[in-house]
Image (cartoon, coloured by chain):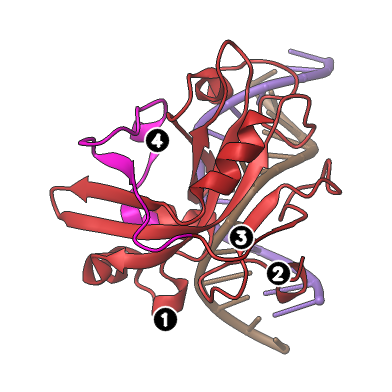
Chain colours: A red, B brown, C purple
Amino acid sequence: MQTVALAKALIGLCLVRRSPDGITAGRIVEVEAYLQNDRASHAYGGRTARNAAMFAPPHRAYVYFIYGNHWCFNVTAERDAIHGAVLIRALEPLDGLPLMRARRASENDRDLCRGPGRLCAALAIDGSFDGCDLGAGRRLYLAPPVRPADRVRASARIGITRATSKRLRFYEAGNPFVSGPRSLSPA
DNA sequence: AGGATGATCGTCT
DNA sequence: GACGATCATCCTC
């Protein structure tokens, strides 16, 4: 269950994006784990061109395009041809809010990074990041927490049609930047 | 070559 | 709460 351990450990970490336009960064407050033998995983059923990055070594990006509009960003978790990844579902905006507002055209700062597609828009994450390393000094990287994770809870995952009963969504309880239906927020 | 599907979002009622 | 947008990807013919 390496992927689940990573999912929980990511809560509270900072995701930092350096671009020519400036720095944007947020604190991870909500994630979902997608596992080996998980019918909801893009890699269930084997490797394809799209999901190849899911088979990459840990701490790489898996970025995919969905519903004709949105990019979604994952962190890979497993080694040796095991596929596992953690979808980043929401950030608490920390840095570069004016740039996020410009990219998102959002009325409401609470919604800047609340949702997997929204946070990719706010941080300008697209398919060019698929497979990229997320180490320090990159265009996109993970950084230590500015504030430790508080009250991490689990729930069912959102927006999927298969394996709906697995409780593989993890979020910081009470954080207003967590996404999803209110009914799912309580554990 | 064509059709179904989707780890979402914004808008409307 | 419901629905349409919109298109890359994958599967089937």
In the displayed structure, would residue A86 be above or below residue A99?
Answer: above
Q: Amino acid at mark 1?
A: Asn
Separation of residues labelled 1 and 2 (CA atoms): 20 Å
Q: Are dots 2 and 3 in contact, CB under 8 Å?
A: yes
Label 1 lies in what chain?
Answer: A
Secondary structure under the numbered disc 1 in the rendered image = loop
* Residue for badge 2: A185
Write the residue at 42% across / 29% down: A60
Quadrant location of residue B8?
Answer: bottom right
Range drawn in magenta: A121-148
**Position in image of residue A41 (x %, y %):** 70, 33
Along the polypeptide, which appears first: circle 1 or circle 2?
Answer: 1
Q: Quarter of the image for the C terminus of chain A: give it.
A: bottom right
* Residue for badge 1: A108
Apparent side of residue A120 relative to residue A29 in the rendered image (left or right): left
Separation of residues labelled 3 and 4 (CA atoms): 25 Å
Along the polypeptide, which appears first: circle 1 or circle 3?
Answer: 1
